[in-house]
Image: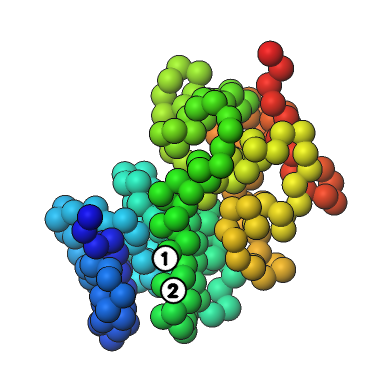
Amino acid sequence: MGATRVLVVDDDPAVRQMLAEYLGAHGYEVRQAASGQAMRAELERGVPAIVLLDIGLPGEDGLTLARYLRERHDVGIIMVTGAGDVVDRVAGLEVGADDYIAKPFDPRELRARLKSVLRRLEGKVEKKSSLTNKISVGRCLLDLKSRTLSDAKGREIAITAMEFELLKALIDHPNQVLSRDRLLTLTRNREWEPFDRSIDIRITRLRRKVEEDPAHPRSIRTVRGAGYMFIPAEK
């Protein structure tokens, strides 16, 4: 099995070179791109497992490119934001990024994030599942084996690795209230800052995909002051 390919998209050549050397020394195959155009050229050469995407690129910014990637490729996306840019972090998650890291960052932390996203992409959550392969969620069907979501007509609906893992965590605990902290533990296995809104953002995104009426959800309920709960469809 070959080395895991990572594409670093950053307009700072020093950052690209540092990551290429550091990640390369730890067994990754690192490709580099300084712009959206260069990123597309690299994608033509081969789709990576993960794209490390700077949000502050000139021209096409990281959010635009993240949306482009999510619509076309099944890759992990880690956004790189400014140290205090909480709005950018939220926006990155909203367009489908799997994780984010703020500059300046410790390369060791970045490598840990890479490994975490890779574990999710490899289907870690499926190992302890005792459910059947296909589960009804609202108006959709979630295939646990292929990690895909489809509507009533069989049309596939795009879903990120983190959205899948969140939905899987809820399904694994039907009719149980799961707090945000519990969901973060089940899906990320690491601590997040108290102000982190990744769970709320992804719940909103999931409701838009699976609920008949996202404004009045029936499958993924909010339990005020406590968390979220999955209500299986009545048979």
Viewer-side residue, 111 vs 70: 111
The single residue placed furthest to the top in the displayed view is 235
Q: Residue at x 56, y 42 (%)?
A: 128
Do the numbered discs 2 and 1 sit on residues whose CB atoms are within 8 Å?
yes
Q: Position of residue 118 (x, y in %)?
A: 41, 57
**Disc 1, SS:** helix
Q: Quadrant of residue 148?
A: top left
The numbered mark at residue 110 is 2
User: Quick check: 102 above or below 62?
Assistant: below
Q: Quadrant of the N terminus?
A: bottom left
Q: Residue at x 78, y 43 (%)?
A: 177
Q: Residue at x 64, y 35 (%)?
A: 171
User: Quick check: 170 above or below 51?
Assistant: above
The numbered mark at residue 124 is none
Query: What colour scheme was applied to this rendering of the protein?
Result: rainbow
Residue that carries the numbered disc 1 in the rendered image: 114
How dense is the environment of label 2, judged by Cα within 10 Å: few (below 14), some, or many (20 and up)? some
Q: Type of residue at label 1?
A: Leu
Q: Position of residue 123 (x, y in %)?
A: 45, 46
CA–CA distance between discs 2 and 1? Answer: 6 Å
Q: Residue at x 31, y 44 (%)?
A: 72
